Amino acid sequence: MTQKNDDIFKLRNLAIDKKEARENLKEDISETKERLRPANLIQEAKDKALDRVQKTGESALQGVKDNPGKVASVAAAAALLALRKPLTNYFTNRKAANDGENGADSEE
């Protein structure tokens, strides 16, 4: 009779374990469905992107604080590169205006 009771006890425990596993699986499936909804995926992607941008910005800001001379040099070089055509035009027109004035003076 003891063997039968042990078997019944084991079967009962297996049934309880099976029920708990089924409930856990249902819970996991429902969480997965919720997470995989398009709106939730989009929000998660936005949150991750925002987090990365913030970390990159903080890193860049720290780099600027650590190397102000290098940053100033790079900024000046970038400004000169961006303004190269207007500066060239300015100096070319200025030289042409000066040459015109000098030519007018030599004619007198």
Image: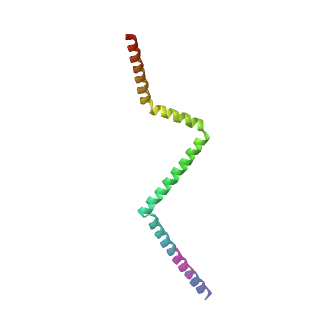
The scheme the figure's colours follow is rainbow
Q: Where's residue 3, x and y in %?
A: 60, 85
The quarter in which the N terminus is drawn is bottom right
Please name whichever residue, 43 or 97, is drawn nearer the observer in this view of the structure: 97
Please name whichever residue, 84 or 70, is drawn nearer the observer in this view of the structure: 84
Q: The magenta stretch spans which residues?
A: 12-21
Q: Where's residue 71, x and y in %?
A: 56, 37
Q: Where's residue 50, x and y in %?
A: 50, 54
Asked whether, in this view, residue 98 is left or right of residue 4, the answer is: left
Main secondary structure type of the part rendered in magenta: helix
In the picture shown, does residue 15 fall above or below 73?
A: below
How many tags in the picture? 0
Q: Quadrant of residue 68?
A: top right
Would you say residue 15 sits in the magenta stretch?
A: yes
Question: Which residue is located at x 43 percent, y 24 percent?
Answer: 91
Would you say residue 50 sits in the magenta stretch?
A: no
Asked whether, in this view, residue 108 is left or right of residue 31, the answer is: left
Name of the residue lying farthest toward the front: 108
In the picture shown, does residue 41 fall above or below 30?
A: above
Question: Which residue is located at x 51 percent, y 72 percent?
Answer: 24
Q: Quadrant of residue 104?
A: top left
The quarter in which the C terminus is drawn is top left
Q: Quadrant of residue 96?
A: top left
